[in-house]
């Protein structure tokens, strides 16, 4: 079975906006990236309800709300400078390092 994996453009710590689905137009920070699955976990998006059994004194039981993964294709990175949803371009600097750049305003994303 051949896997069709592409390199993820989204990194942990990026601010993203959901572009489709039940959480459309919500913004949040990327908490983790799952490149093998092509998914990301975004703060405040795709909230799941988990019923947890008590595991002793230090871990009480109850209903826990936590973020679930969503497909990376359903989110777009938000530029900090122009505050718009944008696609990411790659640019090579004079010193030879590759950086991610906003296609709207040319701002360099911090990696």
Image: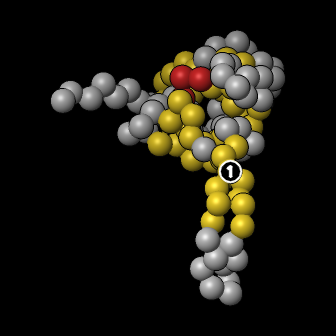
Q: Residue at x 72, y 53 (%)?
A: 65
Residue 10 location, quadrant? top right
The one of 41 and 83 positioned closer to us in this rendering: 41
Residue furthest bottom in the image? 57
Residue furthest left in the image? 1
Q: Residue at x 66, y 22 (%)?
A: 21
SS assignment at label 1: strand
Q: Residue at x 55, y 18 (%)?
A: 89
What number of labels is visible? 1
Whether residue 45 is situated above or below residue 6 in the rendered picture: below
Look at the image and tell me in which quarter the N terminus lies: top left
Residue 42 location, quadrant? top right
**Residue 106: where, in percent of width, then height?**
68, 17
* Residue 79 visible in the current orientation: no
> How does the figure colour the protein chain or chains?
secondary structure
* Residue 20 visible in the current orientation: yes
Q: Residue at x 70, y 77 (%)?
A: 60
Q: Label 1: which residue?
A: 49
The one of 85 and 93 positioned closer to us in this rendering: 85
**Residue 30: where, in percent of width, then height?**
65, 41
The one of 59 and 43 positioned closer to us in this rendering: 59
**Residue 52: where, in percent of width, then height?**
63, 66
Whether residue 103 is situated above or below residue 12 in the rendered picture: above
Number of other residues with Cα within 10 Å of mark 1, as a class: few under 14, some 14 to 19, many 20 or more = few
Residue 86 location, quadrant? top right
Look at the image and tell me in which quarter the C terminus lies: top right
**Residue 15: where, in percent of width, then height?**
71, 35
Locate residue 34 relative to residue 111 in the image: left or right. left
Locate residue 83 relative to residue 49 in the image: left or right. right
């Amino acid at each position: 079975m051949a896997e069709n994996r592409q390199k993820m453009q989204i990194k942990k710590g990026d601010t993203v906006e959901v572009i489709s689905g039940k959480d459309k137009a919500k913004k949040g920070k990327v908490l983790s990236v799952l490149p093998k699955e092509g998914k990301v976990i975004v703060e405040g998006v795709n909230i799941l309800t988990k019923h947890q059994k008590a595991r002793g004194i230090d871990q009480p039981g109850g209903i826990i709300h936590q973020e679930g993964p969503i497909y990376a294709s359903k989110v777009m990175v938000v530029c900090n400078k122009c505050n718009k949803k944008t696609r990411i371009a790659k640019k090579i600097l004079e010193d030879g390092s590759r950086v991610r750049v906003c296609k709207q305003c040319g701002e360099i994303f911090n990696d």
